[in-house]
Amino acid sequence: GMTLSGSGVLSGTPTSATSQPISFTVEVKDGLGAIQSQTYSLTVMQPLALATATLPKATVGSSYTTTFLATGGETPYTYALTSGATQLSGEGMTLSGSGVLSGTPTSATSQPISFTVEVKDGLGAIQSQTYSLTVMLRPAIATISPTSTPRYTHAFVVLRGLDFTAPGLRCYGALQNCGVEVWFGSVRAVVAYASSTELDVITPLQAGTVPVRVVNKGVWSAPVNFTYRSYFYSSIR
């Protein structure tokens, strides 16, 4: 899509990038008929773009790092925030010039944080894109009662703690709207009731000591041990 006019103007809109520079020879002829020529190389690059589409979720109190990626244009790339810097810094998050978003979020957000990242390449071309970052709460188990049950039996167990569900949310039965799960080892328990501070569950059939963990919308709690006791028999003679 490129042409050279008789007045020496090379112009057009390239349609694709080239793996190798395009080599061509330009000839100039003056009014007396003298001719000179020279060979040139033209490199057609991909347009500058931000390749990062979405961001992983962040969790309160956990270190967060993600790197924005750019394509096309000419390196080096330089990144900057053009909006949303205040909201991010309020969550303890910063964006470096090399495109690394990092920090340790201090509080959960009721709505995703919206911000705009701008990338500038070595030739001065600029592109920007708006992103959303969700900061989640990490559930925490404070107590589990009882802490054991005979092995290979179902038991009714109550977990108490923090951030099992969104504040004020209560769910019964199937819990389709709570997004909370309780796992005994590698087996998922049945959750009969859920609130932000309490979970009532029916244990799965297991044996031995297993870690119990709560998962709230993909965020896992630290484990708490639960024991399936062996049966003991005695005989009187």
Image (cartoon, rainbow, N blue to C red):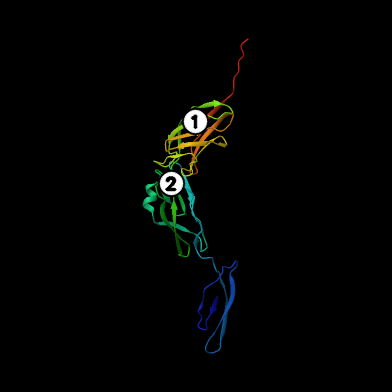
Q: Could you tell me which residue is drawn at 46 percent across and 35 percent down? A: 199
Location of residue 120 in the rendering, given as x and y in whole percent from the top left corner: 45, 61
**Mark linked to residue 77:** none
Quadrant of the rendered image containing residue 129: bottom left
- SS for tag 1? strand
User: Relative to 222, does residue 86 appear above or below in the rendering?
Assistant: below
Does 71 sit left or right of 93 as displayed? Answer: right
Q: Which residue is mark 2?
A: 135
Location of residue 63 in the rendering, given as x and y in whole percent from the top left corner: 46, 43
Q: Could you tell me which residue is drawn at 49 percent across and 62 percent down? A: 49
Type of the residue with mark 1: Val
Q: Nearer the viewer, residue 80 or 76?
A: 80
The reply to whether residue 96 is visible in this rendering is no
Quadrant of the rendered image containing residue 18: bottom right
**Mark linked to residue 157:** 1
Q: Residue furthest bottom?
A: 32
The quarter in which the C terminus is drawn is top right
